[in-house]
Amino acid sequence: MKEFDCADVVPGCEARFRAGSSEELIALGTVHAHWAHGLTEPEMPPEVIAAIHAGMRDVA
């Protein structure tokens, strides 16, 4: 199981995500970024994906 806090990329955002894989976590983060942060691109920019990967943690 993987976990990521959006605040690691967007300071002040309280969203936290858990998923079974990093790919699922990126998908959840992309939907969140569209709704909460106004992402207009269909996919997450590569630099944001890198930041999410850097902030991912393994959880039990």
Image (cartoon, grey):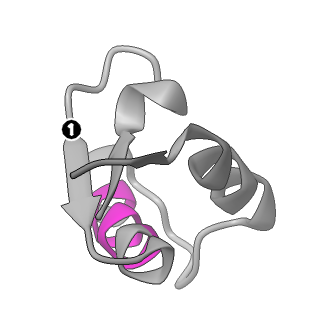
Q: Is residue 28 magenta?
A: yes
In this image, 49 relative to 12: left or right?
right
Report whether 55 appears left or right of 57: right
- Most extreme residue toward the front, as rendered? 60
Q: Which residue is disc 1 drawn over?
A: 15
Magenta-tinted stretch: 26-33
Image point (63%, 54%), residue name: 53
Location of residue 27 (image quadrant): bottom left
Residue 13 placed where, x, y %?
29, 26
Q: What residue do we see at 23% from left, 52% from top?
A: 17
- The residue located at (50%, 28%) in the rendering is 8
Q: Residue 11, percent across and down? A: 45, 17
Q: Is residue 46 left or right of residue 34?
A: right
Q: Is residue 10 above or below residue 19?
A: above
Residue 16 relative to residue 50: left or right:
left
Say what amino acid the circle numbered 1 marks.
Answer: Ala
Q: Is residue 58 above or below residue 5?
A: below
| Magenta-colored segment: predominant secondary structure | helix
**For this rendering, which residue is in front, 38 or 53?**
53
Q: Is residue 25 above or below residue 58?
A: below
Name which residue lies at 29% across and 64% down: 1
Q: Nearer the viewer, residue 16 or 13?
A: 16
